[in-house]
Image (cartoon, coloured by chain):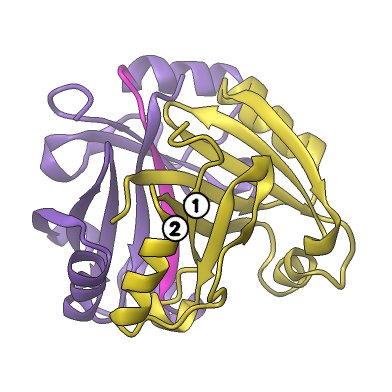
Chain colours: A purple, B yellow
Amino acid sequence: MFARIDHVGVAVEDLDAAIALYETTYGMALVHRETVTEQGVEAVLLDVGENHVELLAPLGPDTPVGKFLAKKGPGMHHVAYQVADIDATLEALKAAGTRLIDETPRIGIRGSRVAFLHPAATGGVLTEIVEPAHGPQ
Amino acid sequence: MFARIDHVGVAVEDLDAAIALYETTYGMALVHRETVTEQGVEAVLLDVGENHVELLAPLGPDTPVGKFLAKKGPGMHHVAYQVADIDATLEALKAAGTRLIDETPRIGIRGSRVAFLHPAATGGVLTEIVEPAHGPQ
């Protein structure tokens, strides 16, 4: 069902400091940067092998990531698994009785299609599935 | 420096329920199960592509994962990156001034060599590096 880990999402307070850590200290290549106004977030994607790290900085305190930071502080926010066909995966998850945040896919960064599963159904792990825009990348 | 995400570590209260979720609902293959008495944990490894999910159940409340669960509840515990040479990686991290939990590698599950970076140095993300026992696997 899941092809690989697509990325680990990390909530950060200071995006420049986080980029310095992942790019300079860890040696990951920064491959994408996008502000998603409707999600209230600035997202930065770095490559680590076939996987990615997604740094998430809130555009304000009254956003999902802003509220996460206020409650839990900076740290791991979610894990995303790559799928070849997100529609089929969502149908299979629904058939298995899995509670979803997104019943239908929405557009993620880099033109991907994404959906979040509900943490109540995933042992407290905010879990995303991602169908990349141009197949596995 | 980092070859890929080796695994995401997930703290769980009910190991059988977590295995059912990852194995049956998500379709991941359970490839390893190990009790690490000195870490106070029962660990289960599942494959997802070249990556893994590591489920961590505490052997008691007075263990690191037991304390994590009491404080934060079940959910993501750490992320681990695969490296080819953990000694060289630790030297490079030390040279960059990165604060470490493990100054020298210790033995992880499946005979791997592992070390943890300090969350204070990693933006709140408990970060592990892993040199697999027999090269990337």
In front of the other: label 2 or label 1? 2
Q: Residues under labels 2 and 1: Cα distance?
A: 7 Å
Along the line of sight, which residue is nearer the eye, B8 or A83?
B8
Asked if residue A81 is among those painted magenta in the image, a careful observer would answer: yes
Q: Position of residue B59 (x, y in %)?
A: 87, 57
Residue B77 in view in this figure: no
Asked whether disc 2 touches disc 1, contact meaning CB atoms under 8 Å apart, the reply is yes
At x 54%, y 64%, the residue is B115
Instruction: Give percent across and percent down for residue A81.
Output: 40, 35
* Figure quadrant of the N terminus of chain B: bottom left
Which residue has dot 1 on it? B130
Of residues A2 and A127, the one drawn nearer to the viewer in this rendering: A2
Judge by depth and name the residue closer to the eye, A107 or B78: B78
User: Mark 2 is on which residue type?
Assistant: Ile
Residue at mark 2:
B86
The image position of residue B25, as x and y in percent, is: 61, 23
The magenta region covers A74-85
Secondary structure beneath label 1 = strand
> Where is residue A57 drawn, in percent x and y?
24, 70
Q: Residue at x 52, y 35 (%)?
A: B134
Chain of the residue where label 2 is placed in the rendered structure: B
